[in-house]
Image: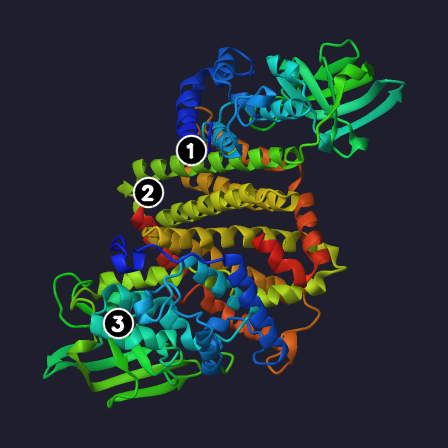
Amino acid sequence: MTAMSPVPPAAQAGRAHVDLGRLRREVQAFLTDARTTGAFTPTVDCWLRGFDPRFSRELAARGWLGVTWPERFGGRNWPNAARFVITEELLRFGAPITAHWMGDRQIGPSVLRYGTPELQHEFLPRIVASEVTFCICMSEPNAGSDLAALTTRAEPADGGWLLNGTKIWTSHAQHASHGYLLARTSRGEKRHDGLTEFIIDMDWPGITVTPVADMSGGRHFNEVVFSNVLVPASRVLGEVGNGWRQVTEQLSFERGGPERVLTAYPLLEHAVTQVAGKPHLYPELGELIARLRTLRRMALSLTDALDRGEAPVQQAAALKVVGTEFEQRVVDFAARALDVEADPLGDGVAGLLAGAITASPGFTIRGGSTGVLLSILAKGRNR
Amino acid sequence: MTTETAQMLRSLADDVFGSLAAELRSDPPGLGKPWDTIRELEWPAVGVPESLGGAGGDLEDVLALAEGVGRNAVNVPLLPAHSAYAVAAGGGRTDLLDKRLAVETQPRWSSLRVEELGRRLRISGTARRTAWARHADALLIRVPEAAGSRWIACDPRDPAITITPGLNLAGEPRDDVLFDNLVVGAANRWECADGSLATRGTLLGCAALVGAIDATVSLTARYVSDREQFGRPLMALQSVAQAVALMRCQLSAARAAAEAARQAPTVVNCLAAHVDIAGCAGRVARSAHDLHGAMGVAGEYGLHLFTKRLWAWPEEGIRQADARVELGRHAAERGAEKLWADVIA
């Protein structure tokens, strides 16, 4: 694992001052109101299963997307701590944020870091306005944890690249206007060489999206087949052949956020409500709350590291390992503490619990499985 | 001293404790030259304002020293001495700061009866598991009825006091102190309203545990890198490398927990940090011994110096089982509405 390259000077320049307490109160007031009026119903795993473009545009209208990006791209040059406040409030409310999530969290920062000025001007303002929605085309049928084994090929063609291959487990590809895609552009001695990142339009000819139901019947996964899809040269993200290094950096954005701690938080609130009068459950609840405080501090420290331009690849991996384990413990605890049984058809908390249980295996898999992350941590510092 | 000195103190503590290690690990523990060295450095008085007779510096500095105690597994009464200093200084009892060693009794393990005899007090009962009592020149007792702000000092050599030596798992003195109708004059009681002292001991304990976890992880990583089995270093086995990586994750978590408590040291927050760090300590100790094999339990190899502390310290002062119940009850009583505000406080 290479260290992250320095943050571009534009992103590192003096950040605007933000009154974080006030920002938090504004976000809380908005979310409380939206929840009360039924604009959303809190869910578990809301950043992967809460696809609601209208809600995302509401957030965009308030200026809460892409807040750390330079103002010339529609951002606000806010510190990462401000984005942390916004995202952790959205997550703990269980708000539907999937539609803008991938763009705001990782594709925007990647474009900012590696994109040409043309790509930056084309996409960053539209992510900020929630006019575009991204899906992530990384995994393939034979390249999951071993991402470098991918076989989707992009070959030089007139005006760009010709794309052929199959991606799978692509969440919300059926709704996304655009996709991020990692493909092989050459085959050298080292398998990590010769990979290249692309930004694609999902409505280009030759792209076929087929839903893959998950075990709860949910329809966020897809298989995406690319058959002679022509990708203009301008849509290469970063350097041809440098995709591995770029994607591992992107994954550190993906791994180190509060969503690796708070995915099941709405369920924890229900459990706290229903634990009253059940003292035998207090010790376990106490342990969970203690750990939650710790994990939040770890995530917050990562945010500070990003602002300082540091390379928190290792810390991000560590947070994901312990944070997602906590999320699964919350679900297990809720299943024992709540007064209802999980019911996929149930209203309210019974349905919430059912959704949480079936979503929970994914917590420690997506974004790098715990085993892979521990290997990354081991390689980073084996002595 | 200032906040910036914490980093310097951290490395200085490693140097000093490291150089004193052999003497400090003598058994049974005494208060020899190492303690005089530490006193000359004024470390027991760090974190106590100079205006009150202390050495100055802030909480971060004290915690840096506490972490050093854990990371070097040194058998010195620095943490109890610091707590006693802070209580004495907070009550204007600067005379007690000149004692070679003052320690306080633990309310958790005390069953003491304190009666008023006019202006004097009569104390009877037992203060169990008092740290380093046998070596103390002054014993401080928090009067239980006075909501934690009233203190008494007494001379442990008084004939009305009997001290029975004991040890914790790590070989640190934890003595039972029997008070047989000890009478204390009015001059030896005082009020200390400093609320931060209530959580100080917990924070110190958290920092010391973080230090011991740190040392355990380092020692284990070094051992599996050097030790060869199956024709290669143990670290080359994926399961071993992953177990070490997981230990590092626990160390990161423990550090974050301690830092969260330091920044908002309410009683509940400190309790939460203690519970979470105790969990990390237990997991790290188990993993360290697993990875060391038989060598880990060998008397002459150093691992047990750390793991015994990881086992002993979490249960001192407050029982983990009680702390977990307390945290859970607090959350349940505050309710879901206040949960988030409490978590980010």
Q: CA distance from mark 2 to mark 1?
A: 40 Å
Task: Look at the numbered disc 3 and give the secondary structure of its residue.
Answer: helix
How packed mark 1 is, by other alpha carbons closer than 10 Å (few <14, some 14-19, many 20 or more), is: few
Q: Name the residue beneath numbered marker 3.
A: A120
Task: Measure how far apart labels 3 and 1 are at the Cα level.
Answer: 41 Å
Residue highlighted by disc 1: B4
Q: Chain of mark 3?
A: A
Disc assigned to residue A115:
none
Residue A310, percent from left and from top: 32, 50
Three-letter code, disc 1: Glu
Q: Tell me the residue at 61%/77% (across/down).
A: A351
Residue B234 has which mark?
A: 2
**Sequence order check: which comes first, mark 2 or mark 1?**
1
User: Which dot, 2 or 3, sits closer to the camera?
Assistant: 3
In the image, B96: left or right of A313?
Answer: right
Q: Please, what is the three-letter code of the amino acid marked with disc 2?
A: Leu
